[in-house]
Image: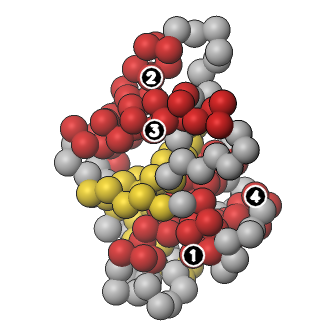
Amino acid sequence: MIILGIDPGLAHTGWGVVETRGPLARARAYGCIASTADEPIDMRLGRIFREITGVIQKYTPTDLAIESIFFGQNTRSAIPTAQARGAAIAACAASGLAVGEYTPMQIKQTVVGTGAADKIQVIYMVRHVLALDHDPEPDHAADALAAALCHARLSSGYAHAKLSIQPEVAT
């Protein structure tokens, strides 16, 4: 299974592609789509749509794992984040990807073992599970990889087993 994980945001949309084979997982690629507040909204959303479309064309994922919006006290950023999320989902829908939507707490619980995990713990576990030789940066990309790992674990027959480190590159 090849999963595209997305951590949506208008200023920074993180993405990560994870390939799984049974309980084994590896990162194929990851990155972040950045824009600035002085750019028109249509240009920012268009960039998210185009770049996610490009990632889909290059890595051919079958599934999308996207973080749902949770804001608590910070409702001012809800609409811009929802717009970025919509642009990303539209790109994925145009390519026919199956969608898995997860709360930040679900992702942390699945990847780290506690829904109260902080960014450092998420980055550590993503690095460990995917056997990366460095921390995935920026943290938005690490969050996207974590979303993909969450989807891999919860949507597979391996939901009760930890994902393992893959010792060699899958072909």
Q: Which residue is mark 2?
A: 45
Q: Earlier in the sequence, mark 4 or mark 1?
A: 1
Q: Earlier in the sequence, mark 2 or mark 3?
A: 2
Q: What whole-number distance in Å separates the C-alpha atoms at marks 2 and 3?
A: 9 Å
The quadrant where residue 103 appears: bottom right
- How would you rate the neighbour count of disc 4 (Cα within 10 Å): few for under 14, some for 14-19, many for 20 or more? few
**Residue 49 in view, yes or no:** yes
Q: What whole-number distance in Å separates the C-alpha atoms at marks 1 and 3?
A: 22 Å
| Looking at the image, residue 22 lies above or below residue 11 | below
**Residue at x 57%, y 10% (from the top left corner):** 39
The type of residue carrying mark 3 is Arg
Q: Which residue is mark 3?
A: 85
The type of residue carrying mark 2 is Leu
| Looking at the image, residue 95 lies above or below residue 79 | below
Q: Earlier in the sequence, mark 3 or mark 4?
A: 3
**Residue at x 26%, y 57% (from the top left corner):** 98
Q: Are marks 1 and 3 in contact (CB under 8 Å)?
A: no
Q: Earlier in the sequence, mark 2 or mark 4?
A: 2
Q: What whole-number distance in Å separates the C-alpha atoms at marks 2 and 4?
A: 26 Å
The type of residue carrying mark 1 is Thr
Quadrant where the image shows the N terminus: bottom left
Q: Which residue is mark 4?
A: 119
Q: What whole-number distance in Å separates the C-alpha atoms at marks 3 and 4?
A: 21 Å
Secondary structure of the residue carrying tag 2 is: helix
The type of residue carrying mark 4 is Lys
Q: Which residue is mark 1?
A: 110
**Residue at x 54%, y 86% (from the top left corner):** 162
| Looking at the image, residue 28 lies above or below residue 53 | below
Q: Earlier in the sequence, mark 1 or mark 2?
A: 2
